[in-house]
Amino acid sequence: MKTTVHTDKAPAAIGPYSQAILINGFLYTSGQIALNPVTGELEMENIEKETDRVMQNLKAVLAAVEMDFSHVVKTTIYLSDMAYYAQVNAVYAEFFGSHPPAREAVQVAGLPKGVNVEISMVAFKG
C-alpha cells in the first residue's frame, strides 16, 4: 500500500508533490532544501548551515515514519557548484557515521529558490 507522508516538522511541499511516499517498507523522499519549517525562510548563511538545515528537514521526514538515518540506503545530492562538495560532505557525514548509504552528488544548472544544495533519500525498514 502506498502512503503519503507529511510532517509539519519539515517544510511543506512548494509544488504538486509529497514530502515522501512510503511503500512496501521503502521511503522515497522528495528533495529537501534549506527552508526552515517554522519560519518558511531559507537558511543560507553559509553552505554548512544550509546543508545542516537540509539534513534536519530530512531527519524530520524520516522521523514521521519512525525511521532515522540508519535506514537510509541511497541519497542524491544536487549542488549548484561542485566547489561546495567538501563542505557539504563534512556536514552530511555527521549524520551517517561509519555506515553511509550509496549516493551520487551532481552539479546542476539551478535549484529551487536559488539554493546551493538539495538532497533526496531512499530509506528502507523491513
Image (cartoon, helix red, strand yellow):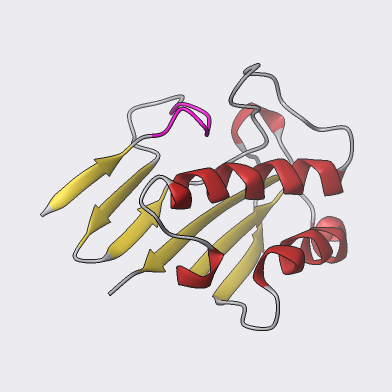
Residue ID at (64%, 29%) = 35
Is 119 inside the magenta-drawn segment? no
The answer to whether any part of residue 27 appears in the image is yes
Closer to the camera in the image, 92 or 66: 66
**Residue 91: quarter of image:** bottom right
The answer to whether any part of residue 109 appears in the image is no
Residue ID at (43%, 59%) = 67
The percent coordinates of residue 103 (x first, y second) are 57, 73
The N terminus, quarter of image = bottom left
**Residue 116: quarter of image:** top right
Residue ID at (79%, 52%) = 81
The percent coordinates of residue 122 (x first, y second) are 42, 64
Q: Which residues are magenta?
A: 7-13
Closer to the camera in the image, 81 or 44: 44
Residue ID at (86%, 66%) = 86
The percent coordinates of residue 51 (x first, y second) are 74, 48
The C terminus, quarter of image = bottom left
State the residue lying farthest toward the left: 1
The percent coordinates of residue 85 (x first, y second) are 81, 63
Q: Is residue 11 left or right of residue 27?
A: right
Q: Is residue 53 above or below residue 35?
A: below
State the residue lying farthest toward the front: 66
Q: Is residue 116 left or right of residue 105?
A: right
Main secondary structure of the magenta stretch: loop
Is 9 inside the magenta-drawn segment? yes
